[in-house]
Image: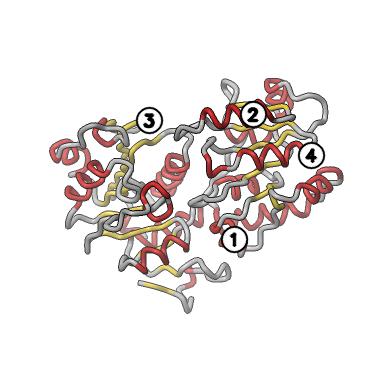
Amino acid sequence: MSDLVGRRAAIVSYRLGMADGVSVTAAQWRTALHALGMRVRTVAGAGRADVMMPGLSAHALRPPSRRALAAALDDVDVVIVDNVCSLPMNRHVGEAVAAYLAGRPAVLRHHDLPWERQSYVDVSDWPPSDPAWTHVTINELARRALGDRGIAATTIYHGFGDQPCPEHRDRVRRQLRVVGDRPLVLQPTRAIARKNVAVGLALTAALDGTYWLSGPAEDGYQHELGALLQSSPVAVRRRLPTGVRMPCAYAACDAVVLPSSWEGFGLPLIESALHRRPIAVGEFPVARELAAYGFRWFSAADPEPLRSWLADPDPSLLDHNEAIARKHFGIDALRRRLGLLLSGSPLCHPSNPACDEGNGACACLIG
């Protein structure tokens, strides 16, 4: 992997530097690429990036010009495209990026694909592909689906680093006005239909807790969310208080709920383990995929086991989940797989958690 030292990479997306999953995991890749000795530039249409290019925004009326793309990307060795050529939120933008990258080394990382969203289910000619490109998915389900459509891909799971919280747990709880020892149940997601806020509220009610929804309402869900919260019998907290980061939200809560019906990955599955918090999980497909690694989660649809655990916590469950998360989903695991990918070495599919591509002897190695 030493041949990567000094090479230049650019991470390109609709938006970066925000709290959404693409932004968070793009930052993970930047950290891992730096650890490999590479120089990294971020380019985005919205949010915060090294190079801001409004034409890349999901809401841009005009896509970026070839000249603008060339000015930002001509001098890099590999371009990493995060979701711009995956979900056609602004197809003109994706087409402009794809046309510029034709014949050039690029990694297209797919967080979402058209058939995974009802609004794009009729799109049959996306994502684009090119012999010079490498496709990367964030789960095995998407990799197989791409394969069925004639596009070979490699799965690289997210890699999480340590995120210390200097703020004291009690301080954040005071900011939230959490009363006494009532459980604080964190749903660390945006508020959209597939996040199943109603299930999170119901679980919190069964625990006699306070419900904390950290993300904003999006995709026209504001009215429905308002009605749900108004009719709920539980105390509700919204968003992060000023100066409070997500690691501190995990430190402040007593339990995490991720009741989604669909997630491309589900960052809280790993974040809760690393922050040593129990999590109640919905029945979405990628959760079943990641559960194969041996995680011990509670069901979001059945509050009683979590209620019992909170009444008499067993630290061995937290030890178990944290150890799995660090081994398979830590920043070092991401660095190793990215190093292999970018140096042209074979990787194994992560379907079998016992596999270790680093030893070069897996039966499931792929080119």
Say which of marks 2 and 1 sits in front: 2
Farthest-out residue, right: 312
Question: Nearer the N terminus, badge 2 or badge 1?
Answer: 2
Going by the numbered disc 1, the residue's amino acid type is Arg
Question: Nearer the N terminus, badge 1 or badge 4?
Answer: 4
Question: Nearer the N terminus, badge 3 or badge 4?
Answer: 3
Going by the numbered disc 2, the residue's amino acid type is Leu
Residue 309 in sight in this render: yes
Bin the neighbour count of mark 4 within 10 Å (Cα to Cα): few under 14, some 14-19, many 20 and up: many
SS class, disc 1: helix
- Say which mark, if any, is on residue 226: none
* Residue indicated by mark 2: 229
Left or right, 152 with respect to 253, comes to: left
Say which of 172 and 162 sits in front: 172
Residues at marks 4 and 2 touching, judged by CB atoms closer than 8 Å = no
Q: CA distance from mark 2 to mark 3?
A: 29 Å
Say which of marks 2 and 3 sits in front: 2
Say which of 211 and 105 sits in front: 211
Q: Quadrant of the N terminus?
A: bottom left
Q: Quadrant of the C terminus?
A: bottom left
SS class, disc 2: helix
Say which of marks 4 and 2 sits in front: 2
Question: Where residue 131 sits in the image (x, y, percent)?
Answer: 22, 64
Question: Nearer the N terminus, badge 2 or badge 3?
Answer: 3
Residue sitting at x 53%, y 71%: 355
* Residue indicated by mark 1: 288
Q: CA distance from mark 1 to mark 4?
A: 25 Å
